[in-house]
Amino acid sequence: MTPEGKVKARIDKLLKKFKPHCAYRKPVPGGFGMSELDYYGVMNGKFFAIEAKADWKEPTDRQKACIREFRASGGEVFVIVAVDDENGFAELEKWLSVQLTLNVLEIAS
């Protein structure tokens, strides 16, 4: 498995903990369109995206533009840069947990 594949595997494991409340897709880059971010999803009606990197690399300029666009539109974007990026994974898990809690509170009211 590639270093980035290991990051994505850890992201997959984390996202699966929040199923069925978390819907997400991992678009497969093709030869015809723009490659953008690695994950797109919705949790409690809130859009999120994730970019996975390995070895503490930065997103490309195209990815940075995509991140700015989604954030400017109110979406949440996470950039996880290594399999041991504990801050990145903790930030994502905290956000997902908050969304799950809000969802439970909305259902209860």
Image (spheres, rainbow, N blue to C red):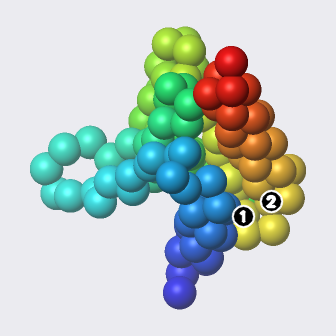
Across the whole image, how many numbered discs are drawn on residues?
2
Q: Is residue 41 visible?
A: yes
Residue displayed at 77% across by 54% down? 89
* Residue 43 numbered mark, or none: none
Residue displayed at 47% across by 19% down? 69
**Residue 15 or 19: which is nearer the viewer?**
19
- Residue 99 location (% of width, % of height): 68, 33
Q: What SS does tag 1 mark? A: loop
Q: Is residue 19 left or right of residue 100?
A: left
- For label 1, the residue is 82
Instruction: Measure the C-alpha gap from mark 2 to mark 1.
Output: 5 Å
In the current view of this chain or complex, which residue is farthest to the bottom?
Answer: 1
- Residue 97 location (% of width, % of height): 75, 42
Q: Is residue 55 visible?
A: no
**Residue 24 or 69: which is nearer the viewer?**
24
Residue displayed at 54% across by 45% down? 21
Q: Is residue 18 left or right of residue 2?
A: right
**Residue 55 or 48: which is nearer the viewer?**
48
Labels 2 & 1 near each other (Cβ < 8 A): yes
- Residue 91 location (% of width, % of height): 80, 43
Residue displayed at 50% across by 13% down? 73
Disc 2 residue crowd, few under 14, some 14–19, many 20+, Cα 10 Å: some
Quadrant where the image shows the C terminus? top right
Q: Is residue 8 left or right of residue 66?
A: right
- Residue 18 location (% of width, % of height): 62, 54
Q: What SS does tag 2 mark? A: loop
Disc 1 residue crowd, few under 14, some 14–19, many 20+, Cα 10 Å: many
- For label 2, the residue is 85
Q: Is residue 28 above or below residue 96?
A: below
> Mark 1: which amino acid?
Ala
> Mark 2: which amino acid?
Asp
Quadrant of res 96? top right
